[in-house]
Image (spheres, rainbow, N blue to C red):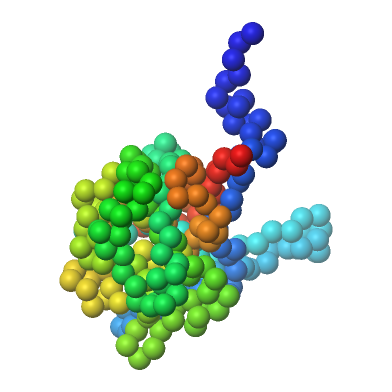
């Protein structure tokens, strides 16, 4: 008897429950938090729906909408061209399809972030995780769990800003450079509004995750949810951004496949 194919085994696992699909995507609506930049910089739009018809004289049998949104609103994918360091690199439509499915390492710093919203991950933190869990996955994602998804109910709680700016966790400049230049991953996934820490505007360089990672041709995933449902290793992430030609990024549906015993 022939052995079942890999795809048949995958489907069997999904149907039988031995493989769980975890949705890492924040629902997209007019209340979805968006990043706020200080004047005079341009601002991204909140998500908006414009009804075209809803079973009425504009269209008696169908319901549909137009929508307006910033590329970097809600759960979204950052392409290298998003930052000046990657201005000659790829847009979101040119991301190879094979890179949209990749293994993930999930590093949990939620306890530290709960104590200090300005908590920064250092290279030594990642090295300590590797000592317990093995190396970061080749051509995979480094996922940063901070518990920040629990704050996504309101703009104010999510951005956590005061007169000095936002206070959210992230990578230190040295760690961002290491992830960009030395780690084998294709990108960084976070639960916060952007891949950089809230204080990153004052770092050297400013916004080092954007500067180093995108300048190295790597990617970002932001405003992820439910990272607490993933194991430290073994999950496979499926990231599906809209393939916007010349786009710097796009809203994305992000799923994780997790093998359950």
* Outermost residue, bottom side: 163
Residue 73: tell me if it is visible.
no
Measured as percent of width and height from the top left, residue 213 is found at: 27, 55
Q: Where is residue 121, by image quadrant?
A: bottom left
Above or below 88: residue 167 = below
Measured as percent of width and height from the top left, residue 41 is found at: 32, 78
Residue, x 32% and y 44% (percent of image)? 135
Above or below 116: residue 249 = above
Give the total number of marks visible in the rendering.
0
Residue, x 45% and y 67% (percent of image)? 110
Residue 140: tell me if it is visible.
yes
* Outermost residue, left side: 204
Q: Where is residue 220, by image quadrant?
A: bottom left
Instruction: Determine whether, in the image, residue 156 is placed left or right of residue 93.
Output: right
Measured as percent of width and height from the top left, residue 177 is found at: 21, 58
Residue, x 64% and y 8% (percent of image)? 1
Instruction: Determine whether, in the image, residue 113 is placed left or right of residue 2.
Output: left
Instruction: Determine whether, in the image, residue 251 is placed left or right of residue 207.
Output: right
Measured as percent of width and height from the top left, residue 216 is found at: 23, 51
* Outermost residue, top side: 1
| Image quadrant in which the C terminus is located | top right
Residue, x 49% and y 44% (percent of image)? 235
Out of 104 and 207, give the one closest to the viewer: 104
Above or below 15: residue 90 = below
């Amino acid at each position: 008897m022939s052995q079942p194919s890999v795809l048949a085994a995958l489907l069997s696992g999904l149907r039988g429950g031995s493989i769980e699909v975890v949705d890492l995507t924040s629902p997209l609506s007019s209340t979805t938090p968006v990043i706020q930049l200080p004047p005079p910089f341009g601002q991204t739009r909140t998500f908006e729906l414009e009804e075209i018809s809803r079973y009425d004289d504009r269209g008696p049998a169908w319901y549909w909408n137009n929508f307006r949104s910033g590329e970097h609103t809600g759960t979204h994918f950052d392409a290298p061209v998003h930052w000046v360091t990657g201005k000659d690199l790829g847009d979101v439509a040119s991301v190879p399809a094979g890179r949209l499915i990749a293994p993930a390492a999930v590093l949990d710093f939620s306890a530290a972030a709960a104590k200090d919203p300005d908590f920064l991950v250092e290279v030594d933190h990642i090295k300590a995780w590797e000592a317990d869990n093995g190396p970061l996955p080749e051509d995979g994602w480094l996922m940063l769990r901070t518990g920040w998804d629990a704050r996504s109910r309101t703009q104010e709680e999510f951005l956590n800003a005061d007169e000095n700016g936002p206070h959210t966790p992230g990578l230190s400049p040295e760690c961002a450079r290491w992830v960009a230049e030395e780690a084998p991953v294709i990108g960084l996934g976070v639960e916060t509004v952007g891949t950089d820490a809230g204080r990153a505007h004052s770092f050297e360089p400013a916004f080092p995750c954007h500067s180093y990672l995108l300048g190295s041709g790597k990617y970002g995933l932001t405003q992820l949810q439910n990272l607490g449902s993933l194991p430290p290793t073994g999950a496979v992430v499926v990231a599906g951004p809209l393939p916007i030609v010349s786009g710097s990024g796009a809203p994305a549906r992000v799923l994780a496949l997790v093998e359950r015993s």
